[in-house]
Amino acid sequence: MFKNLSKNLVSFLIILLLLVGLFGIASEEGGLFDAPERVSSRQLVEKINENRVEKITLTGNELDILLEDEERVITRKEADISLFEFLERWGADEESVKEITINYEEEADWGWLTTLLIVALPIIFILIFFQLILKQAKGSASSALDFSKAKARLFGEGGMPKKDVDFEDVAGLEEAKEELKEIVEFLKDPKRFDKVGAKIPKGVLLTGPPGTGKTLLARAVSGEADVPFFEVSGSEFIELFVGVGSGRVRDLFKKAKEKQPCIVYIDELDAIGRKRGAGVGGGNDEREQTLNQILVELDGFAQDTKVVVLASTNRPDVLDPALLRPGRFDRKVILDSPDLKARKKILEIHTREKPLAEDVVLQEVAERTPGFSGADLENLTNEAAILAARKDKDEINQTDLLESIEKVMLGPERKSHILTDKEKEISAYHEAGHALISSLLAETQEVRKVSIISRGQAAGYTLKMPMEEKKIKNKTEFLSEIAVLLGGYSAEKIIYNETTTGASSDLEKASKYARKLVKKYGMSSLGPISYGGEREHVFLGEEISEEKNYSEEIAAKIDKEITKIIKEAEKKALKLLKENKEKLEELAKVLVEKETIEKEEFEKIVNEK
């Protein structure tokens, strides 16, 4: 406020000084205007006697003199005498005066206007200045009062129009939709639940991996419910000053109770709902105060309060246990990656407004995208549309969609990255090794495409798809997958008797699988014991206090088991590739020539050989 006040004061003083200066300059002789030269009475009479004066214009007591050379000069006579008396007194020749044209003009009365300007203008500027000061002070005061107001966006009943999304726009989340339909029905017809003594949950927590549709599902609730819908992000509660977040929480729930029945949706709840006391140092910070206020507000709901709180997060493991107990967020809705059937429905939704060619088969696209989330599939269809537009086509065909799958998974083609002949050959043998091991082992995924065209960070890639989607994997599948990952490494070893850096990513993944087999899944000779699985994004405080649940002796045994699994997988891959070296060389040869082998051609080469 004071900064803006001083800024306005300086601006006002500068403008005032400029106006005073301009007024002074304009009022001076020869100031801003090209004013004629002022001469004395004696000089005027001398010019008259020399017959150099052609015309005199008298305005009041001011004399405007036009000389013979078109030059103009001015002078002033006494107020109490006439022009002729003035000239005679100063010795003007009577005959010369008669030769001069004399005009008389009325003098304009500027007295009242000058007075008005002199008096009124400063007053007007002072009034404007103080008005600006008061306006600034009022704005600062109101902004200070609004600082603790909730920044939630209200949809419906006096707020923004509801988003045009309903449950029909959400595919593959049938169980989650059923859970949320109950919430919508309760808000529309609470008596139906009251008569059987049913109490609707105060809070519903949507959890699942990123991109699975948590926010979309919440927006669908907004579209389905005929009640006000408050939407706010968890990060919008947090500010620099302690107490602002809790004030915004109080204001949000106050507004919600005034609009009940209604829905409050908090996106990214983990921004304010993390476990308390996990960090080093005191816990009296802004985030914890905000969390405490949310807990208090949830407890403060009376049984007849018709406010339902929805929240979403992809990190339910970091939430404070107090949030998840019954009476607060006591209903959890799990959203998982869509299966084949759901992926096809999602693709149909995202291609409704896109022109598709007759050759498009969304079933095939769905089959090639296991593990894709709803957001990935939306991105895929958008990339296909961009690709079609880049080729100046009016429709999206199947080729655009299939190419977009690889772009989303691996990145765009690196056309500027041209491999040397030697690198191309190494990459061909490497990818052929992966593909061949995958086709020879049981419990492996089907090879759909092999390519040595660079995408993203990869010099080549082998695209594999599962024969059927599974939620449970056995040890044989893990061991086969590790062998497939080591197929490229082993192929380089057989052909060149040395390895390259191209296998670094494969080795990292294989080691990760082997470690999980031993430590997490109990699939080793150490027995069915979990040795503290790998934890990601651990809080600093927990990491300091956490201890291993196994000894150094067990740690050494774990390392030996991991090494044993990797070595056995490598031995299996080397054995299979040596036995099928002719197939390996044929695949590599075709890859060098064509750069890409599709499923049909790959199976033909492997079966013929």
Image (cartoon, rainbow, N blue to C red):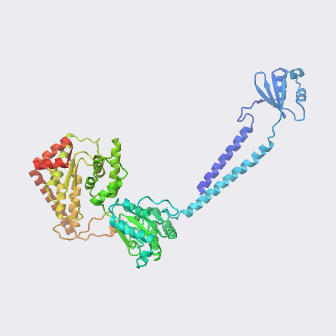
Instruction: Please say whether residue 80 is visible from this viewpoint.
Output: yes
Q: Is residue 302 left or right of residue 509?
A: right
User: In the displayed structure, would residue 329 be above or below residue 4?
Assistant: below
User: Which residue corresponds to the image point at 38% horizontal and 74% vertical from the top-left?
Assistant: 325
* Above or below, comparing residue 193 to residue 517 in the picture: below
User: Is residue 126 toward the left or the right of residue 66 in the image?
Assistant: left
Q: Residue at x 16, y 62 (%)?
A: 476
- Name the one closer to the observer, 187 or 321: 187
Q: Quadrant of the N terminus?
A: bottom right
Vertical side of 74 occupied by 18: above or below: below
Residue pictured at 48% horizontal, 68% vertical: 249
Residue 496 position, x and y percent, is 14, 46
Q: How many marks?
A: 0
Residues 510 and 563: in front is 510
Closest to the observer, 335 or 434: 335
Tell me residue 167's x, y (percent). Answer: 38, 62
Q: Is residue 497 visible from the viewing direction of this image?
A: no
